[in-house]
Amino acid sequence: MSERFFIRELPNGMTLLGQQMAHVSSAAVTLVVPCGAACDPPGLAGASAVACEWCVRGAGERSTRQLNDALDALGCQHQEMVRSEHMLFGAAQLGRNLPAVLELLADVLLRPRLDDETFGPGRALVEQDLATLADEPARQCSLMLRERFYPSPLGRCVYGTPEGLAAATAETIRGHIDGHYRPQGAILAAAGNIDWPALSDLGERLFAGWPAGRSVEPELRPPAGGTTHVAKDSAQVHIGLAHRAAPIHHELYYASRMAEMVLSGGAAARLHTEVREKRGLVYHVASHYHSLKGHAGMFTYAGTRPDLAQETFEATVTEIRRLADGVCDDEVTRARTQLKSALIMQGESTSARANALASDWYHLARLRSLEELSAAIESVTADEVLAYLHAFPASEFTVLAIGPEPVDTGALDA
Amino acid sequence: MQFKHRKLDNGLTIVAEVHPPAATMAAGFFVRTGSRDEPAELAGVSHFLEHMTFKGTPRRTALDVNREFDELGAHYNAFTSEENTVYYGAVLPEFQARLLDLLCDILRPSLRQEDFDVEKNVILDEIARYQDMPRYRLYEMLMAEYFLPHPLGHSVLGTTESVAALGRDDMQAYFDRRYSPGNVTLVGVGKVDFDALVDQAAQMCSHWRPYDVRRDTAAPPPAVRRKVQADPGVAREQIGLASPAPASQDDERYAAMLAATILGDVTGSRLFYALVDPAIADEASCVYDALDGSGVFLTFVSAGPEQAAEALRIARDEMATFLDGGPTEAELLAAKNKIASGATLKGELPMGRLTAVGYDWVYRGQYVPLADQIEALYAVTPDEVLAVARRYDMTSATVVALGPVEQL
């Protein structure tokens, strides 16, 4: 049975998307606005994160508390966050409460109070989130690696920098919101127990009057790349490596996802088997595909004890490279099953579907059905995976390691 | 949805919440054993054993186990807590029999010496991984300070020393004491074929020999202790509080859940408005941990070193205020809506129902449909929440702190 998709593009550039799902009582919504960390102005790194935090401190007629209480009363499980390319609002609740939640989200987006007295605490929370990274070395490794791998400023750390946050003022952040919160490229995706005609009308009523702004694309600079060591007296060495992968619109995209599965799709995949299972070098080693518009990478992480760091690094690099020597049919068959199974399980979750709709629209300007995705996965052969591995070779790695001693990356030059 | 259950002659219980319209099914073995059941010198054995079940059986090597799970496209894993060790997987319905073949087989692991020796290194690395998480270190400190010498204070992972000292035979002896079929429940949810589940379990598990398994579920005496551990390698001050709460078997557990939500949910709670909204703390939360024969309220606060003392004082003031006046009607309704909404969302996925159905059976020997639980939740009155707050006085708590601060 194929999914019921709905699309409505508003004249001001905002898109409404819907997927009606049977047998669920919840409805989830993902709302993205093109104001991510990548568009933080020079000298104001972290501006988008501060803006996102500030927007929810009172909107429309409601104070912070009244807004929070209204969302809580609707049983809304919500999150607000800034990512590289977007500010994202996510909300999940019983389907019958979705319309009321959307009214509140519209207030937050279009009529945030942005009072002077709430600016300080909002900015302070972002500063504290940034400071907390020092206590989360695995996460810090991942964020710093992205920053160096992607063309700047696409991969920039979403929390900004201490200097950028300190420089922010209520006035400059209001200006930032004015300049970047706009309907062009904004996407509202709802999935689950929805009434599309009513939702579509509501979306129009709430957002069609959002004045069009000007589209702002950040100017890109080449990625920093290279190898970086961050000294920390930690119990583990946290090793991150990244190399180029096929972006979503690329013809070898599905082959890249299959390669990801063969390398790291489960406990029988290459990394887990060779680095953990057979050698006991790590508890956690994994590769995952990540992309921004037009750019993608395979990001590998291994956490290991300092005395095993060198061996772990070399074993991990060996496995990533060895993939290009050949993948066998069993591995490809397994990868197919895993990808299709994951798709079906994602299809049960209203919030996963809302996220997928927004992502599809952003990257492809269309929605991919389960049938299309299954067929695409089914069609990838072992040869095509190899073609992908040769087109996007495991070379020119960006490396970021956090731990007591640097790792010798000589193996990368071999 | 339909609930079904059966018990094999050897005491293995099989329960299922059957939901034919679901797209997937999930199954899991719930073993009623965890760190609280370990002798101190075997600290970490339950968790290490959980790892070892994936390392092979008489008819499968570790690589076979991993490969077969992956061939099913299974989302699978296992976890160990203070009280339970759970092995589970979710698959498309056509793979039910193969999933069960795997799960039933690995519950009788071979514990081969070479596998044991290699996997020990993986466990030691896992311990190191958690040492780099100040929040987790604080949790262990808090449980130890509050509960010890009661076994609920044992670390689930164990220590580098205790795990290094564990021998393969120690593990086998522990397995032989705890994994009796009478101490295990097989749970199925989603699009599960119950008759096939029972037939297969009977075929594969009837030979599991039953024996007596005990657990002393007497509640530990409440402890009011204080420990501040200075660690300049930690950037933010982590603060934890622990105090008694209703047991998982108590009718007051719904009121306790609501009290914790009103006081310390991550959004819109007393602690949120008092600490996070004004950015005195970056995180403040309170959870109700329902245990076997006892319970504990756990509160966590994370703040910068210069604000830590103030954050702790404010948190304690909020607890005192709550104990004094209880919740408002609006707060109570909002908490009910949030919990009900969260449970409904979680319940739409087979994996979300697996632990709910499993724990209802393991802890209370009953099945309660989600709708009935939500109804019971909405029936709780403000007075009942206040009664729990007063009976389980959170102002009398063990306090621990970890971070740059020397004194609090």
Image (tube, coloured by chain):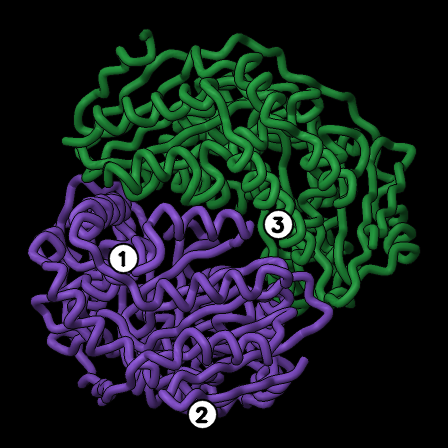
Chain colours: A green, B purple
What residue would you read off at disc 3?
A341
Image x and y of residue B304, in percent? 30, 46
Residue that badge 1 annotates: B52
- Residue A70 is marked as none
* Residue B171 percent location from the top left of the image: 17, 65
Residue at which label 2 appears: B251
Give the position of the C terminus of chain A as an image quadrant.
Answer: top left
Chain designation of label 3: A
Circles 2 and 3 on the same chain = no
Q: Amino acid at mark 3?
A: Ser
Q: Is residue B407 above or below residue A41?
A: below
**Amino acid type, residue under disc 2 in the picture:** Asp
Left or right, A386 with reference to B31: right
At a point 52% along the width and 8% down the height, the residue shown is: A222
**Front residue (pair B207, B293):** B207
Residue in the image at 14% along x and 31% along y: A307
